[in-house]
Image (tube, rainbow, N blue to C red):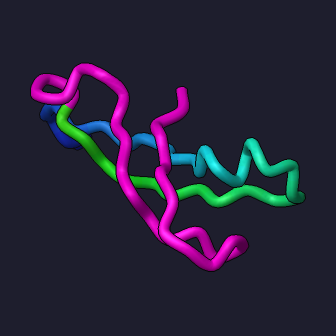
Amino acid sequence: MAKKGNRIQVIMECTEHKNSGMPGTSRYITTKNKKNTTDRLELKKFNPILKKMTVHKEIK
């Protein structure tokens, strides 16, 4: 049976890397509660290509 609940998987993408024009992307997959957090998620995560902590925003 499938899980029931409000938690959904979301993809986080680095905003600084996208604007820099460098090849490749830094993405993370995480979950969020869609009832409590209706707007898009924004977290600081490590970008291995830029080798520093950057802001990752939810896409799709």
Q: At 13% across and 34% down in the image, what residue appears?
A: 5
Work out whether residue 55 or residue 28 is closer to the camera in this orientation and state it: 55
Numbered disc total = 0
Tell me the quadrant of the picture where the C terminus can be found: top right
Tell me the quadrant of the picture where the N terminus can be found: top left
Q: At 18% across and 36% down in the image, what residue appears?
A: 33
Work out whether residue 21 or residue 13 is closer to the camera in this orientation and state it: 21
Q: At 20% across and 42% down in the image, what residue appears?
A: 3
Q: Position of residue 27 (x, y in %)?
A: 59, 56
Q: Answer left or right for 46 relative to 19.
A: left
Work out whether residue 40 or residue 20 is closer to the camera in this orientation and state it: 20
Q: At 47% across and 40% down in the image, what residue appears?
A: 57
Q: Position of residue 11 (x, y in %)?
A: 50, 44
Q: Which residues are magenta?
A: 34-60
Q: Answer left or right for 49 relative to 37.
A: right
Residue 39 forms part of the magenta stretch: yes
Q: Answer left or right for 2 relative to 29.
A: left
Q: Position of residue 55 (x, y in %)?
A: 47, 51
Residue 56 forms part of the magenta stretch: yes
Work out whether residue 49 or residue 7 is closer to the camera in this orientation and state it: 49
